[in-house]
C-alpha cells in the first residue's frame, strides 16, 4: 500500500475512529507510522503489598476485603475499598468509574496495577487497571508503546493501526545512503520504524530513536540552509535613525536597564540604522527584560516614520502587551492597535483600514497578523515573541507584508550557544544574560510524595494571603497505560484537598481558544486562586500576584523546561516559591533536579541539562515547544544534533554532492521537509 493511503484503509477504522485520528493530525498511513510513542511501559512481576514502595507503579494479586463503596464528593464519584494479599492490605480508589463496583467482588482474586501513594487513609493505589492473568503474562517484561491520545481513542487502537501500517506499507529505498549510515552508526529507516514502535529491547529502541532523531535534525538543517540561500544579506531600505523618543523613554523608566540590556539595545540600534537589513535573535531568561528592547525598537521605528508589528503566541499575552505599549507610547503620539482572532469582524476591518492608511504605527497581535486582509503602509520592523512557537512560514508571512523589513525574534528558552548557532544559523545572536537587580530570587525545593500534604497546606497559606498558585501536570487526561498526574483528574483531587473557598480550575492545550483565553483572563484578574495546567502555561501571561509554582512528576521534564515554567512566578515584588514534586528518589533523578535548587540562571541550567541527561534518559517528556520536531529534543539529543550538523556541513562544503544521482531520494525528502517547515 502507498504511504499516502488514508487511515480509513486500516481494518477496524470507521468514520468515527477516522475523525478521532484526525484530531491527532493523523490522516494517512505515513502519519500513523510517524505518530511515535511518547513512552514505553514494562509490566514487572507481581509484588506482595508489603514490598511496594511509595510512588512505585506495581501489580498486585489481591482480593477485596469487602464490597467496594461508591460515594459522591464535590461533584466526583469515588469508588473505594480495601484490597488484601497474604502480606498486607492497601486502599484503592477510582474516580468517576462507579461501574468498577460490579467488576470487583469479595471472594474473587484479581490482578490490579497502578501507582501507590501515601494519602490520609494510608498507602493508596489510585485508578488501578484490572488485568487478566493471560493478558498480564503476555505483557510481562515486554516494552509496550504508549502513544499520545485523544478522548475516545485508546492506546490499543493506535497500536493496532501502527501494526497494520508497518505490515502493509511498501517501503522504498532508504534515502540515507549506506555510507552515511555507516559513518554515523545509523540503522535503516525501515528497521527504525519497526523498533521505535515495537522494540525487542531497550537497546534496539535507543538505536531506532537515534536514526529517527538524526533524520529530523539532518533534514531540518539542510532545509534551513536552503532557505538561508535565498536570504543573502540585503540592503537596508528602512533606515531607522531617530532615537530621541527612546532616550526619553529610558530616562523615564522606573528602573535602570541592566548592562546586558544596554549592550543588546546598542546591537539592535546599529542594525536598524546600518547598511543591511536586521535579522537578530535575542535570547534571554524569563524576566531578563527582552520586551523593553522590543519596545525601544518599535518606538524608534514609529519615530522614524515607519510601522512596526509584534506577533505573540496567545491572545492574553497580546492584550497585556497592547495595554502596556499603549500606555508607554501615548506621550510620544504613537498609535498602538490590537489584532487577534477573537475580535469582531467589524473591529478587525477598522484595524485593517487604519494599518493601510498608516493611522496605526504599531500593531500587537497573534497569528491574526498574517491574514491576507492585513496590509501595511510602511512596515519596517517585525518582532516575533517566543520564536519557537511559530513556524518559519508564519514569520515569513508577516515579513512579506513589508518591503525588506527588519526582523527581531525573541526567545526565553535558554538554548546553549553551541546549539543556538546550529538552530538559528540565519540570525545574528544577542544574549541578555543578566536579571534586573530588584527581582527577588525564587526559593526552590525538590521533594517527594511525603511532602505532599505539607505542600497543600503551604498553598492554602499563600492563597489566604491573597496570592495565586500554578500547578503543572504532564498530561491532559488519564492515559490507558501511563502512570502520571493528569490535569483533569488532578484538578478534582485538589478541590477535595484544599479549603472550600479556594477556586481551582484547569487549563490545557486541547481546549478551544475561547476557553483558554477565558481561563487565563480570569486567573490574571485574580478570580481563580489555583490554576492546574499542562506546559501550555510556559508562554502564557504575566501574573505578578502568582507566588507559587508546584510541578508534579518533575522528573519527567527537562531542566530547561522546568526553569521556563518556574519563570511564571517571581514576576512581582513578593517572595515566590517553586516546589518540584518527584515520584522518583534515585540518585540520578535527585541530582538532576537539585540543579534547580542551586541556580536560577537559565543558561547554566541548560548546560547542566546537557551534561546530566544521558542517551538512556529517553522516557521523560521532551522539551515541549522546542521547534516542531516529532521525536527529537535539542537537549536530550544534543550529541545527535551535532552529528547531523556535521553531516549536513559536508554536503554544503562539497557543493555538488547533493546533486549526485544516488542522493535523489534525499533531495526529495529535503524538499518535502522544507515545505513542512512552512506549515
Image (spheres, rainbow, N blue to C red):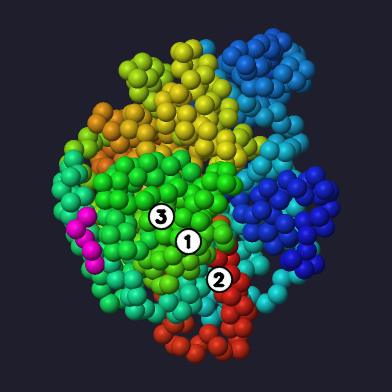
Residue 460 horizontal/vertical position (percent): 39, 17
Q: Earlier in the sequence, mark 2 or mark 3?
A: 3
Lateral position of residue 605 relative to residue 438, left or right: right
Q: Quadrant of residue 252?
A: top left
Residues 20 and 178: in front is 20
Give the mark nearest the N terminus, 1 or 2: 1
In the rendered structure, the answer to whether residue 102 lies left or right of residue 24 reads right
Q: Label 2 vs label 3: CA separation?
A: 35 Å
Q: Is residue 242 magenta?
A: yes
Count of numbered circles in the view: 3
Question: Disc 2 on helix, strand or loop?
Answer: helix
Tell whether position 255 is magenta.
no
**Residue located at (59% from left, 24% from top):** 126
Give x and y (percent) for residue 409.
Answer: 37, 59
Q: Is residue 64 left or right of residue 396?
A: right
Distance between mark 1 and mark 3 Cα atoms: 8 Å
Q: Which residue is mark 1?
A: 356
Q: Which residues are magenta?
A: 241-246
Q: Residue at x 41, y 25 (%)?
A: 526
Q: Which residue is mark 2?
A: 674
Tell me if mark 1 has few (under 14), some (14-19) or many (20+) residues whose alpha carbon lies within 10 angstroms of its own.
some
Q: Residues within 10 Å of mark 3 (few under 14, many from 20)?
A: many
Seen in the picture, residue 678 relative to 52 is either above or below; the reply is below
Tag 2 near tag 3, CB within 8 Å? no
Q: Pointer 3: what residue?
A: 360
Q: Secondary structure at mark 1?
A: helix
Amino acid at each position: 500500500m502507498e504511504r499516502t493511503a488514508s487511515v480509513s484503509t486500516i481494518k477496524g477504522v470507521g468514520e468515527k475512529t477516522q475523525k478521532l485520528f484526525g484530531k491527532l493530525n493523523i490522516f494517512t498511513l505515513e502519519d500513523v507510522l510517524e505518530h511515535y510513542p511518547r513512552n514505553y511501559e514494562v509490566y514487572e512481576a507481581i509484588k506482595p503489598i508489603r514490598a511496594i514502595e511509595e510512588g512505585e507503579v506495581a501489580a498486585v494479586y489481591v482480593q477485596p476485603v469487602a464490597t467496594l463503596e461508591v460515594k459522591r464528593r464535590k461533584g466526583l464519584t469515588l469508588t473505594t475499598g480495601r484490597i488484601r494479599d497474604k502480606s498486607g492490605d492497601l486502599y484503592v480508589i477510582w474516580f468517576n468509574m462507579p461501574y468498577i463496583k460490579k467488576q470487583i467482588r469479595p471472594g474473587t482474586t484479581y490482578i490490579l496495577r497502578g501507582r501507590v501513594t501515601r494519602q490520609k487513609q494510608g498507602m493508596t493505589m489510585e485508578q488501578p487497571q484490572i488485568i487478566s492473568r493471560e493478558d498480564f503474562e503476555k505483557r510481562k517484561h515486554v516494552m509496550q508503546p504508549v502513544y499520545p491520545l485523544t478522548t475516545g481513542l485508546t492506546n490499543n487502537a493506535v497500536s493496532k493501526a501502527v501494526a497494520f501500517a508497518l505490515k502493509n506499507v511498501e517501503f522504498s529505498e532508504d534515502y540515507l545512503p549506506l555510507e552515511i549510515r555507516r559513518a554515523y552508526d545509523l540503522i535503516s529507516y525501515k528497521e527504525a520504524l519497526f523498533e521505535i514502535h515495537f522494540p525487542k529491547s531497550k537497546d534496539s529502541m535507543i538505536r531506532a530513536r537515534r536514526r529517527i532523531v538524526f533524520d529530523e535534525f539532518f533534514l531540518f538543517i539542510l532545509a534551513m540552509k536552503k532557505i538561508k540561500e535565498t536570504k543573502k544579506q540585503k540592503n537596508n531600505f528602512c533606515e531607522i535613525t531617530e532615537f530621541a523618543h527612546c532616550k526619553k523613554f529610558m530616562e523615564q523608566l522606573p528602573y535602570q536597564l541592566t548592562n546586558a540590556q544596554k549592550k543588546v539595545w546598542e546591537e539592535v540600534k546599529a542594525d536598524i540604522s546600518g547598511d543591511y537589513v536586521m535579522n537578530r535573535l535575542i535570547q534571554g531568561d524569563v524576566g531578563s527584560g527582552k520586551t523593553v528592547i522590543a519596545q525601544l525598537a518599535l518606538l524608534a521605528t514609529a519615530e522614524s516614520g515607519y510601522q512596526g508589528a509584534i506577533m505573540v503566541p496567545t491572545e492574553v499575552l497580546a492584550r497585556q502587551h497592547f495595554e502596556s505599549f499603549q500606555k508607554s507610547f501615548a506621550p510620544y503620539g504613537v498609535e498602538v492597535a490590537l489584532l487577534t482572532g477573537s475580535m469582531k469582524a467589524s473591529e478587525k476591518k477598522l484595524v485593517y483600514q487604519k494599518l493601510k492608511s498608516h493611522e496605526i504605527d504599531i500593531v500587537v497581535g497573534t497569528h491574526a497578523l498574517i491574514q491576507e486582509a492585513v496590509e501595511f503602509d510602511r512596515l519596517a520592523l517585525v518582532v516575533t515573541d517566543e520564536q519557537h512557537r511559530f513556524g518559519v512560514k508564519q514569520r515569513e508571512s508577516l515579513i512579506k507584508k513589508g518591503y525588506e523589513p527588519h526582523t527581531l525574534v525573541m526567545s526565553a528558552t535558554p538554548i546553549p550557544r553551541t546549539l543556538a548557532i546550529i538552530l538559528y544559523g540565519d540570525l545574528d545572536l544577542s544574549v541578555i544574560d543578566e536579571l534586573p537587580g530588584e527581582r527577588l530570587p525564587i526559593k526552590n525545593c525538590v521533594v517527594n510524595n511525603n511532602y505532599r500534604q505539607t505542600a497543600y497546606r503551604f498553598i492554602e497559606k499563600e492563597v489566604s494571603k491573597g496570592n495565586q498558585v500554578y500547578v503543572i501536570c504532564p498530561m491532559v487526561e488519564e492515559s490507558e497505560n501511563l502512570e502520571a498526574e493528569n490535569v483533569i483528574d488532578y484538578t478534582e483531587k485538589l478541590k477535595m484537598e484544599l479549603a472550600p473557598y479556594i477556586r481551582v480550575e484547569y487549563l490545557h492545550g486541547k481546549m478551544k481558544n475561547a476557553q483558554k483565553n477565558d481561563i487565563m483572563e480570569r486567573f490574571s484578574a485574580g478570580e481563580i486562586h489555583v490554576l492546574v495546567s499542562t506546559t501550555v502555561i510556559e508562554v502564557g501571561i504575566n501574573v505578578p500576584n502568582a507566588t507559587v509554582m508546584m510541578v508534579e512528576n518533575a522528573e519527567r521534564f527537562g531542566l530547561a523546561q522546568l526553569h521556563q515554567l518556574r519563570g511564571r512566578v517571581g514576576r512581582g515584588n513578593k517572595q515566590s516559591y517553586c516546589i518540584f514534586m518527584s515520584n522518583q528518589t534515585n540518585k540520578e533523578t535527585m541530582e538532576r533536579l537539585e540543579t534547580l535548587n542551586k541556580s536560577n540562571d537559565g543558561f547554566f541550567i541548560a548546560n547542566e541539562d546537557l551534561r546530566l541527561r544521558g542517551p538512556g534518559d529517553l522516557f521523560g517528556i521532551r522539551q515541549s515547544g522546542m521547534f516542531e520536531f516529532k521525536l527529537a529534543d535539542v537537549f536530550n539529543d544534543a550529541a545527535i544534533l551535532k552529528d547531523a550538523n556535521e553531516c549536513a556541513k559536508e554536503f554544503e562544503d562539497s557543493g555538488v554532492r547533493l546533486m549526485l544521482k544516488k542522493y535523489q531520494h534525499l533531495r526529495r525528502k529535503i524538499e518535502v521537509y522544507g515545505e513542512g517547515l512552512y506549515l
